[in-house]
Image: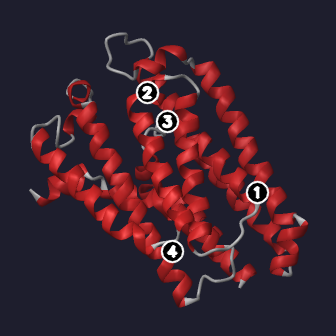
Amino acid sequence: MLLNYLKLIRVHQWVKNLFVFVPLLFSLHLFDKDYFLTTLFAFVIFCLASSLIYVINDIIDIEADKSHPTKKKRPLPAGEISKKSAIIVVAILAVLQAILLPNFNVEFIYFVTGFIALNIFYSFWFKHIVILDVFSIAAGFSIRVLAGAVVIMVPISSWLILTTMFISLFLGVMKRHSELVLVEGNEDAPSRKVLSQYSLNFADQMATIAAAGVIICYALYSVSERTVNIFGTENLIYTTPFVVYGIFRFMYLEYIRNKGDNTTKIVFTDVQLIITIFAYTLTTILIIY
């Protein structure tokens, strides 16, 4: 029963909330106890907020998920947890948010509230509107980064915000591409309504633009005058190959191996991506600190 509830709130998806740590990493305060704990608590808040959204979304899509090849295994459509119990979980998560949020500054509260509102709009409307659906996903990641900056009250580079936006757009488009491949040639296969407004060629072009945006914005961030002045070094440019390799590796996994539908699963299972992320993080810390 506990495992079913952990699946319902999608604990494995909490890894996405690690984006709130991005400002901390680049703020020169990573090893400052107070800054780290504040960001850690902010991470917990976003985990509660994202779980709240996941449960609401599952309640809304319960009937559609029953006919989906993989989503039908989720606790709600599988009948392992009742709709009434799921609503109680939503209420508990909402109460926890209401109790914990007042402990943070006003700017952070605004971002968390905006994050929840955005995702509720996404669950009901935005996910059915072509292009706006992937932009909504990207906005969610950008909000996490901005919230991570305001909670510890540090400025964040515009280039870094743009990098976050493009990488989340890239992942969102890759997911749409994977879904299109799944339903291609099988009209009876269950799929999102919005997929009828996409095509593989269109998704490919969007993915290419988003991938280029990630690489260009990050490269410009690493050599910008502000970055060099803050860190006192131009060596951050040497972390760019890890970013490029990570993007190309993900594209390979989607286009050649057809594994781009579950970003979290890829991050935890693909050895090369795990090594790339670890090497990037370690190199960045060594250069900055």
Who's the residue at 48% across and 50% down the image?
115
Label 4 environment density (alpha carbons within 10 Å; few <14, some 14–19, many ≥20): many
Residue 76 pos. (x, y %) = 17, 39
Tags 4 and 2 touching, CB below 8 Å: no
Residue 86 pos. (x, y %) = 17, 46
The alpha-carbon separation of the residues under discs 2 and 3 comes to 19 Å
Which of label 4 and label 3 is nearer to you?
4
* Vertical side of 166 occupied by 61: above or below: above
Who's the residue at 88% across and 77% down the image?
229
Mark 1 secondary-structure assignment: helix
Mark 4 secondary-structure assignment: helix
N-terminal-most mark, 4 or 1: 4
> Is residue 6 among the parts visible in the rendering?
yes
Residue 57 pos. (x, y %) = 31, 38
The alpha-carbon separation of the residues under discs 1 and 2 comes to 29 Å
Who's the residue at 45% across and 67% down the image?
43
Q: Quadrant of the C terminus?
A: bottom right
- The amino acid type of the residue labelled 2 equals Trp
Mark 2 secondary-structure assignment: loop
Who's the residue at 25% across and 29% down the image?
65
Question: Dot 3 corresponds to which residue?
Answer: 175
The alpha-carbon separation of the residues under discs 1 and 3 comes to 26 Å
Question: Dot 1 corresponds to which residue?
Answer: 158
